[in-house]
Image (tube, rainbow, N blue to C red):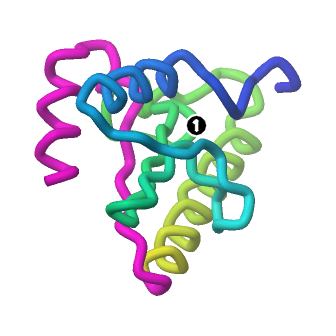
Amino acid sequence: MAAIRGKHTKPELIVRSVLHGMGYRFRLHRTDLPGKPDIVLPKSKTLVFVHGCFWHMHRCRLGRVIPATNAQFWQSKRTGNVQRDKRNARKLKADGWRVISVWECWTKQPDELNKRLASLLD
């Protein structure tokens, strides 16, 4: 697990590129906010979390994978991630932030990602 990065992942770079192309300017990984959001849009008080489908149990094909070995450990680890995400989102919304989650599988189709981000940010 030491090889798994938390910052500057490929899906995150794709989302950042799309946002920059749309004209948005942002800050990265603000440590003073709960959950250390991947992308912070300060003008619109919006936060973007780029979630890996497996790690955060998305409903897509990648998020439904059940590991063959040590399944109980991985299930509790992933469930803990989802609970932490919800807890952090509640705190951020209470502080007046708008929270957007972008899933790894969305980044596979950049045109579709562009449309989704445009609708979520407007």
For the N terminus, the image quarter is: top right
Q: Quadrant of residue 35?
A: bottom right
Taking the spot 57% from the left edge, 64% from the top edge, the residue there is 83
- Does residue 60 lie above or below 27 as drawn? above
In-image side of 45 versus 52 (left or right): left
Taking the spot 19% from the left edge, 50% from the top edge, the residue there is 120
Q: Nearer the viewer, residue 89 or 14?
A: 14
Density class for disc 1 (Cα within 10 Å; few <14, some 14-19, many ≥20) is some
Residue 62, how many percent across, how many down? 42, 24
All told, the count of numbered labels is 1
Q: Amino acid at mark 1?
A: Trp
Q: Can residue 61 be spotted in the picture?
A: no
Q: Is residue 26 magenta?
A: no
Residue 12, how many percent across, how many down? 50, 27
Q: Quadrant of residue 87?
A: bottom right
Residue 56, how many percent across, how many down? 52, 43
Taking the spot 13% from the left edge, 54% from the top edge, the residue there is 122
Q: Is residue 120 magenta?
A: yes
Which residue bears the numbered disc 1?
A: 55
In-image side of 33 versus 56 (left or right): right
Taking the spot 70% from the left edge, 48% from the top edge, the residue there is 77
Badge 1 element: loop
Q: Main secondary structure of the magenta part?
A: helix
Residue 103, how many percent across, how many down? 38, 35
- The span shown in magenta is 94-122
Q: Can residue 104 be spotted in the picture?
A: yes
